[in-house]
């Protein structure tokens, strides 16, 4: 079987990475594409107390189980299915359940730090950085964390100022230099999305 095309989509929190992934996903036949979220690969913390887990800095490279992520990416690239973890952001640890992901022609890997790890970078065929203004990103993060992760406004703001913003400046923003393509304004940039889909289709049809 032909090796799948592995596309990395990164950018800061709330930049629109997921929107870009979803827009590409909608324009490619579903049987040909799968999405892997780096957020699924936060380290299991079931051995810690709940109070200890709440102190996790989710925007630091050490929060991720890169060893498992790299293994799963290599399995998919070798046309083998994987059992993708599910992370519970309310309990701050992995769930016992997993999701089976079958290899597809296109694999999208989405996450804030996928270009930080050299071994992951080297697996990617196309590297995309979604570049969005900080004020837009923080508003989106507030909306998401309240609706989807059960957080309070005070806890989100505290986390953003103490860990998210410093980590973005230290770890995320510098990885822009590794990107093949920089997309301003994420999924709202229809021209960039159309160009990416055209490129993907041309590779699929080779």
Image: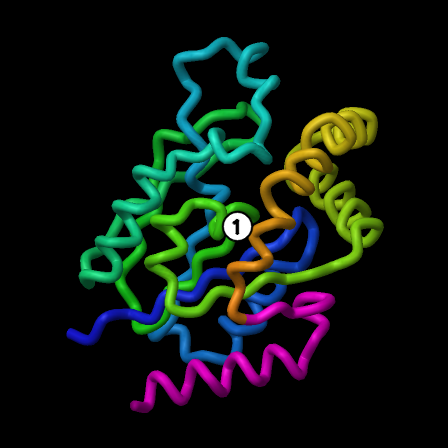
Asked if the magenta segment contains residue 201, the reply would be yes
In what quadrant of the picture does the N terminus appear? bottom left
Range drawn in magenta: 181-206
Q: Is residue 36 left or right of residue 141?
A: left
- Main SS of residues in magenta: helix
The residue drawn where x is 84% and y is 50% is: 135
Q: Quadrant of residue 58?
A: top right
Q: Quadrant of residue 141?
A: top right
Residue 183 image offset from top left, x and y in percent: 65, 69
- Which of 148/33 is in front? 33
Judging from the image, the colouring scheme is rainbow
The residue drawn where x is 41% and y is 30% is: 95
Q: Does residue 29 lie above or below 174 as drawn? A: below
Residue 189 image offset from top left, x and y in percent: 70, 75
Q: Which residue was labeled with disc 1?
A: 111
Q: Does residue 162 lie above or below 119 as drawn? A: above
Near mark 1 (Cα within 10 A), the count class, few <14, some 14-19 or many ≥20, is: many
Q: Is residue 194 left or right of residue 154?
A: left
Residue 179 image offset from top left, x and y in percent: 53, 63
């Amino acid at each position: 079987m032909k090796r799948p095309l592995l596309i990395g989509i990164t950018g800061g929190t709330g930049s629109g990475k997921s929107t870009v992934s979803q827009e590409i996903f909608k324009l490619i036949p579903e049987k040909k594409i799968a999405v892997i979220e780096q957020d699924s690969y936060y380290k299991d913390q079931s051995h810690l107390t709940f109070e200890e887990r709440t102190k996790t800095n989710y925007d630091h490279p050490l929060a991720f189980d890169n060893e498992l992520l790299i293994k799963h990416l290599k399995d998919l690239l070798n046309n083998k299915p994987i059992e993708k973890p599910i992370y519970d952001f309310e309990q701050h640890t992995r769930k016992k359940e997993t999701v089976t992901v079958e290899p597809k022609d296109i694999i999208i890997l989405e996450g804030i730090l996928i270009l930080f790890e050299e071994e992951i970078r080297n697996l990617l065929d196309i590297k995309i950085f979604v570049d969005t203004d900080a004020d837009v990103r923080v508003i989106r993060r507030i909306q998401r964390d309240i609706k989807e992760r059960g957080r309070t406004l005070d806890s989100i703001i505290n986390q953003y100022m103490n860990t998210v913003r410093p980590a973005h400046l230290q770890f995320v923003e510098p990885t822009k230099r590794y990107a093949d393509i920089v997309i301003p304004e994420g999924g709202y940039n229809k021209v960039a999305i159309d160009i990416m889909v055209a490129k993907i289709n041309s590779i699929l049809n080779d």
